[in-house]
Image (cartoon, helix red, strand yellow):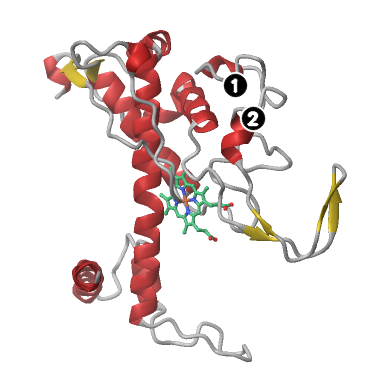
Amino acid sequence: MKKVGKDLDKVLENIIMQHEQRAREQQGRHDHKDFFDVLLSLMDQPMNPQDQHVYILDRTNIKAILLDMMVAAFDTSSGTVEWTLTELLKNPRVMKNLQQELEREIGMDQMVEEKDLKKLNYLDIVVKESYRLHPVAPFLVSRESMEDITIEGYFIPKKSRILVNTWAIGRDPNVWSENVEEFYPERFIDNNVVYLRGNEFRLLPFGSGRRACPGMNFGLVIVRLVLAQLVHCFTWELPSGVETKDIDMTEAFGLSMVRANHLLAKPTYRLLDKAM
Ligand code: HEM
């Protein structure tokens, strides 16, 4: 554990040093400041000098924030991509629809880019359906109730620890419909299920409220872009002898619910050569 800690510290130090060096070289003419440039510019000064308890962000705090971001971003994004690809392999009809959307909107002579994502409506509902069945954080982050309350006849005392089971909500036929176990993105076509807004609590892959995921927009771009490129550039096949009904769907139990075993599939390039 100590060795991992030291190695991680080296990686984080490196990232910080690169940012510091770039800031020195550019001497204030720093056009494209990223999140860490902003944090570094606030380092070792009182955040708000008028506050009773003055809080200072030091180098260790910045490394902790950087690590927090990396941990929060990695498994969640890669886990979503892997579950969605699994469902696409299990459901060739949906894979075909998605590839057709990509052929129609992007063509076969170029790769998908971030600017194209707004055109890919089917991709959007495929990702929503994937989150319904495979929320990466199935219990979100636990909450504590601030006051006594009764909801639907259940009394919840103040200071109870609350887990929101988004996995169960996603598979509840009273919330969705009888075909709740089926991977059927079209269920999202005619409804207004949106992530993280108002009183819509059916789909909560990024949580909700004050502690909801601050990386949602960034995460959704990564997930959609990677998936679009994988599905657009390649035809995917299961290993020989494996049928769609045999695909391993075992979930790993933990803070994030990724696949227990990695997905095995064989890609074959499908774009025209000039797309490379
Ligand atoms: C696309 C994949 C992602 C998914 C599915 C996801 C999901 C979540 C969930 C469910 C939570 C807990 C929300 C709650 O309990 O209400 C969370 C928190 C958080 N996420 Fe994400 N996330 C993703 C990507 C990212 C990225 C890319 C970043 C940062 C670059 C990030 C940063 C965070 C942070 C810092 C928290 C803690 C917020 C707090 O406690 O106040 N996430 N995320």
The crowding category of the residue bearing disc 1, from other C-alpha atoms within 10 Å (few below 14, some 14 to 19, many at least 20), is some
Image quadrant containing the N terminus? bottom left
In this rendering, would 137 be left or right of 258? right
Seen at 39% across and 31% down, the residue is 250
Q: Is residue 81 above or below residue 88?
A: below
The kind of residue on which mark 2 rests is Val
Residue that badge 1 annotates: 188
Q: Is residue 102 visible?
A: no
- Identify the residue shown where x is 34% and y is 49%: 74
The residue drawn where x is 33% and y is 20% is 247
Q: Earlier in the sequence, mark 1 or mark 2?
A: 1
The C terminus is located in which quarter?
top left
Residue type (three-letter) at the residue carrying disc 1: Phe
Please tell me which residue lies in front, 249 or 225: 249
**Residue linked to disc 2:** 193
Tag on residue 147?
none
Image coordinates for residue 210, horizontal then vertical, percent: 63, 58
Residue 243 sits above or below residue 82 on the image: above
Instruction: Give whichever of 234, 41 is nearer the camera.
Output: 234
